Image (tube, rainbow, N blue to C red):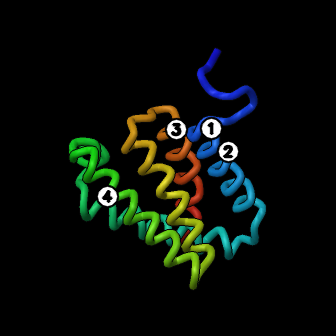
C-alpha cells in the first residue's frame, strides 16, 4: 500500500504530468511561440546564474531560502502570465526545473533539464 488514496496522484506526479502537458502543447505550437518561450527561458536561466554560480550553489543555500526563491518564480510566472502568456509559460517551466533542484529530485531535474535544453536552443 502506498499510503495515499487509491487512484489519487501524488504532488510529484501532478507536477510531472503538468510539465509534460505544457511541453507537449508548446511543441505543437507555432514556431514563433516556441521561440518566445525559449527567449524567456534563457532570460530566466541568465537571472538564475547571476544569483547562483551553479546549481550546486543553489542547493547549498538554506531550505527556506530555496522556498523563497521558488515563491519569487511563482510571482514571475503569474505576473508575466497576465501580460504575456508565453512568458508566464516559460517561467512556469523554469520553476519546475528549479523546484526539482530545490527538493533534490534528481529524476525530475533530469526530465525538466532535458526538455528545457531542447526548448532553449530555439532562441536566436
Q: CA distance from mark 4 to mark 1?
A: 23 Å
Q: CA distance from mark 4 to mark 2?
A: 24 Å
Residue found 21% across the figure and 47% down from its top: 61
Q: CA distance from mark 3 to mark 1?
A: 10 Å
User: Which residue matches tag 3?
Assistant: 108
Residue found 42% across the figure and 66% down from its top: 44
Give whichever of discs 4 and 3 has the lower sequence position. 4
Whether the residues at callouts 2 and 3 have beta carbons within 8 Å, the answer is no
Horizontal and vertical percent position of residue 47: 33, 67
Viewer-nearest residue: 42 or 104:
104
Foreground tag (4 vs 2): 4
Give whichever of discs 4 and 2 has the lower sequence position. 2
User: Which residue matches tag 1?
Assistant: 13
Q: CA distance from mark 1 to mark 2?
A: 6 Å
Residue found 68% across the figure and 76% down from its top: 32
User: Which residue matches tag 2?
Assistant: 17
Say whether residue 94 is left or right of residue 21. Answer: left
Foreground tag (4 vs 3): 4
Whether the residues at callouts 1 and 2 have beta carbons within 8 Å, the answer is yes
User: In the structure shown, which secondary structural element does the residue marked by tag 3 occupy?
Assistant: helix
Residue found 22% across the figure and 42% down from its top: 60
Give whichever of discs 4 and 1 has the lower sequence position. 1
Say whether residue 34 is left or right of residue 53. Answer: right
User: Which residue matches tag 4?
Assistant: 68
Whether the residues at callouts 4 and 1 have beta carbons within 8 Å, the answer is no
Amino acid at each position: 500500500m502506498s499510503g495515499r488514496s487509491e487512484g489519487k496522484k501524488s504532488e510529484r506526479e501532478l507536477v510531472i504530468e503538468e510539465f509534460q502537458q505544457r511541453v507537449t502543447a508548446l511543441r505543437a505550437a507555432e514556431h514563433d511561440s516556441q521561440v518566445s518561450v525559449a527567449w524567456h527561458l534563457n532570460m530566466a536561466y541568465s537571472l538564475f546564474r547571476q544569483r547562483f554560480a551553479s546549481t550546486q550553489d543553489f542547493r547549498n543555500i538554506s531550505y527556506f531560502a530555496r522556498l523563497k526563491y521558488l515563491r519569487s518564480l511563482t510571482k514571475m510566472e503569474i505576473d508575466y502570465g497576465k501580460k504575456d502568456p508565453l512568458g508566464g509559460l516559460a517561467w512556469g517551466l523554469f520553476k519546475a526545473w528549479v523546484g526539482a533542484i530545490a527538493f533534490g529530485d534528481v529524476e525530475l531535474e533530469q526530465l525538466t533539464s532535458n526538455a528545457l535544453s531542447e526548448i532553449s536552443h530555439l532562441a536566436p
